[in-house]
Amino acid sequence: MRITRLVCGHCGSVLSGLGQDQLFFCSNCGKGWSPGEKGLEPVQVQCRASADSRLPLPFWLVRATVHILKRTVRNEFISTMLRFGSRYEEDVLSSKKRETGGQSDRRTFLFPAFPVDGLPGTGVALSEHIRDLPEIIGAEDGLPDICGGSISPADAVVLARCVAVGQETEKADWLAEIEIIFSSVKSALIILPCTQEVEKVAVAETGVSFFRRSVSGWYEIVDYHSCKRTGSIKA
């Protein structure tokens, strides 16, 4: 069993979080860390939540060149749905499809760094509002404590591909099959101020929200921040 000391490799401050966390943010110097084969490894961070944010949450910002190698769409929708359901049958529908591909473009994806039911859809919505995010905050301005970042850097790239597929399904055609690969991938942990509403959580000023009940371990996250505010947890 490997034991990793949760200490910031930059300033020496003790890092805190939840038991399942794979991402740790130093509220003293603003550096990010993730467990690796040789201990904690650095993660690029953008903090956009102030120290007095009541619910700062971690998100992934992934930039990549998206190569669409193959994109197959149906020429019909209603008849194929009635006969074959929503599953794409290449042999049966060979006369009712068209293929495109060979396209590449640079995209930026934004999505939660914690499991959310329907995460790709949330990522599609958030990725459309990256320009609406708050300004980056430096350590001199005061930084928040965070927890709940349980999606590792490697898994973030996989999920970014899922968001890319989600973007393709949003287009005005009937997507049947797609082959996507990424290159020149750059990832950053981004801390955003969030607000609890009656049943949902609003993400910064993006206009995007998700249901609290869709997050596994949501009440642990809320309890963590409540204890931080009352001084029950020390970093």
Image: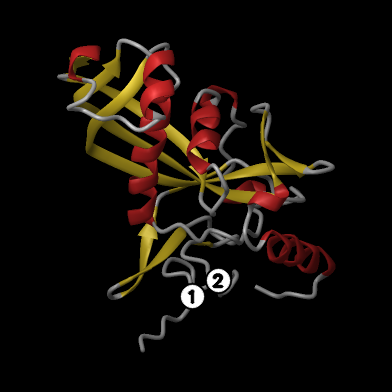
Circle 1 packing at 10 Å, graded few (<14), some (14-19), many (20+), is some
The residue lying at 51 percent from left, 51 percent from top is 113
Which residue is tagged 2? 15
Distance CA(mark 1)–CA(mark 2):
5 Å
Q: Is residue 230 left or right of residue 3?
A: right
Q: In this view, does 198 lie to the left or right of 5?
A: right
* The N terminus - image quarter: bottom left
How many numbered discs? 2
Residue 12, x across and y down, in percent: 49, 73
Q: Which colour style is shown?
A: secondary structure
Front residue of this view, candidates 151 and 26: 151
Which residue is tagged 1? 7
Which of the two discs, 1 and 2, labels the residue nearer the N terminus?
Answer: 1
Do residues under tags 1 and 2 come within 8 Å of each other at their CB atoms?
yes
Q: What residue type is labelled 2?
A: Leu
Front residue of this view, candidates 223 and 10: 223
Residue 107, x across and y down, in percent: 35, 26
